[in-house]
Image (cartoon, rainbow, N blue to C red):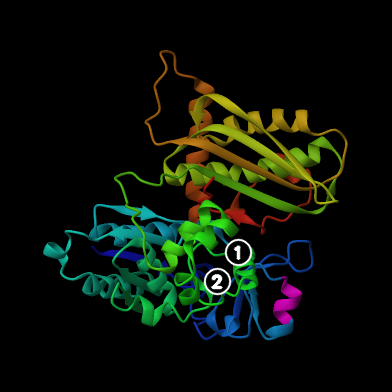
């Protein structure tokens, strides 16, 4: 059995370096982040010189700058990331018919049987690594493993620009000495609970009593024990892991207190979500919105659409209706739009075509082309100008729900 996990290194930051025209390089201390002068100052990604100072994604910018005061701050650009991600996937898809795209910057390949065409899994991993570097200017870490878990642990083992083979013969040597939180699916809370019962490394977890783990963690305890021992029977099926949802949220520069202000911000988020749907060639059957208030509490609403769509104006009609239902005069700190129940099915042609639908679709296609060529800000809908808000915030590309 052989699987590959291909992971783009510091993806957002690397895209900024490649697109800088030589202004930055991979040794530049660069951070992709929100606006520190507003209320969305967190780090989204960073180059390795910044990471070596202890900066991590999600860290407040003030804390990151205290660790790396000479860092260059760059705003995120989703359309740029989407373009590079699609090019990356076109390279990966050449080497296996069974691919699972996992997020915007990772992919699993089931390589079983492909050795007869492309050679060993290790050779193909090196080939993918070199092609991504040559064609896109980005680096990847590739894990080669007996199963998907081993492949993922391999890509995490050495970064950047590396290939690591993890298999049954070296699992104990490579993985057992690692801290338990290095194991896939072990988060901060789980790691803390494991340490409380004396388990600090993957090896200690692997040698723990499966009965004790089940008592402490329930059915998840058995999964933890299996993962620590490198056991994973997950398979990639044709068409597995389809895109399930897309969302975009933004923290407003100041609290919105009126419905027109909120709708203005929601329209901007709807534009982004609809653009991503068109890029994925998928239509949404469900649309929802979410509000977060100054006390950090939140609530949301969603509705099923009579006809799945990726047209901005059609999605926004439902978004605006939901906003009218959800807004009750309470100041809003953050708004978000989410779509789900996605489908790749071709659009069903109605017996009597809607001129409004065709006009709106042509408008979206035209604006997509202009924005792809000249930047996202080349055109703005008048409805987004009602409220001053900044677009560089916590987007969630390829959200899995």
Q: Give the x, y percent position of residue 147.
A: 32, 63
Q: Nearer the viewer, residue 318 or 245?
A: 245
Q: Which residues are magenta?
A: 60-65
Please say whether residue 366 is visible from this viewpoint: yes
Q: Inspect the magenta stretch and tell me whether residue 339 lies in it.
A: no
- Out of 327 and 99, give the one closest to the viewer: 99
Q: Where the C terminus falls, by quadrant?
A: top right
Label count reads: 2
Residue appearing at x 63%, y 33% in the figure: 316
Q: Position of residue 110 (x, y in %)?
A: 27, 58
Q: Residue furthest top?
A: 351
Label 2 belongs to which residue? 181
Indicate whether 236 appears above or below 46: above
Viewer-closest of 17 and 157 = 157
Element class at badge 1? helix
Q: Which residue is mark 1?
A: 190
The quarter of the picture where residue 216 lies is bottom right
Q: How would you rate the neighbour count of disc 2 (Cα within 10 Å): few for under 14, some for 14-19, many for 20 or more?
A: some
| Quadrant of the rendered image containing residue 30 | bottom right
Q: Residue at x 38, y 32 (%)?
A: 345
Residue farthest to the left, as pictured: 116
Q: Earlier in the sequence, mark 1 or mark 2?
A: 2
Name the secondary structure under disc 2. helix
Give yes or no for contact between labels 1 and 2 (Cβ–Cβ under 8 Å): yes
Image quadrant where one finds the N terminus: bottom left
């Amino acid at each position: 059995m052989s699987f590959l996990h291909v992971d783009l290194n510091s993806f957002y930051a690397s895209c900024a370096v490649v697109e800088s025209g030589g202004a930055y390089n991979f040794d530049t201390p660069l951070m992709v982040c929100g606006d520190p002068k507003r209320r969305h100052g967190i780090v989204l990604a960073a180059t390795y010189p910044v990471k070596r100072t202890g900066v991590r994604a999600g860290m407040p910018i003030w804390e990151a700058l205290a660790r790396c005061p000479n860092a260059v701050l760059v705003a995120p650009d989703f359309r740029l990331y989407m373009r590079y991600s699609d090019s990356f996937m076109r390279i990966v898809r050449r080497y296996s018919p069974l691919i699972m795209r996992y997020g915007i910057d990772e992919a699993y390949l089931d390589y079983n049987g492909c050795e007869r065409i492309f050679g060993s899994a290790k050779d193909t991993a090196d080939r993918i690594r070199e092609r991504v570097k040559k064609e896109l200017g980005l680096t990847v870490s590739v894990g080669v493993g007996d199963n998907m878990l081993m492949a993922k642990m391999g890509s995490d083992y050495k970064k950047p620009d590396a290939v690591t083979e993890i298999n049954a013969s070296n699992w104990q040597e490579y993985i057992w000495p690692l801290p338990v939180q290095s194991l896939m699916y072990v988060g901060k809370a789980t790691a803390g609970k494991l340490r409380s019962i004396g388990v600090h490394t993957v090896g200690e977890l692997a040698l723990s009593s499966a009965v004790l783990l089940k008592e402490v963690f329930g059915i998840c305890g058995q999964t933890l024990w299996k993962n620590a021992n490198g056991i994973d029977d997950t398979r990639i099926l044709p068409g597995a892991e389809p895109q399930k949802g897309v969302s975009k949220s933004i923290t407003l520069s100041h609290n919105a207190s009126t419905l027109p202000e909120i709708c203005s911000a929601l329209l901007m988020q709807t534009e982004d979500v609809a653009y991503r749907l068109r890029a994925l060639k998928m239509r949404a059957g469900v649309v929802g919105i979410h509000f977060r208030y100054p006390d950090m509490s939140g609530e949301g609403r969603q509705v099923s659409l009579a006809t799945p769509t990726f047209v901005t104006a059609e999605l926004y009609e439902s978004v605006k209706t939901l906003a009218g239902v959800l807004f009750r005069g309470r100041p809003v700190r953050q708004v978000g739009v989410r779509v789900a129940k996605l489908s790749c099915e071709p659009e069903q042609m109605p017996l009597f075509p809607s001129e409004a639908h065709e006009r709106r679709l042509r408008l979206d296609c035209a604006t997509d082309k202009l924005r792809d060529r000249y930047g996202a800000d080349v055109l703005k809908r008048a409805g987004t100008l009602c409220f001053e808000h900044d677009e560089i915030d916590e987007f969630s590309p390829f959200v899995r729900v």
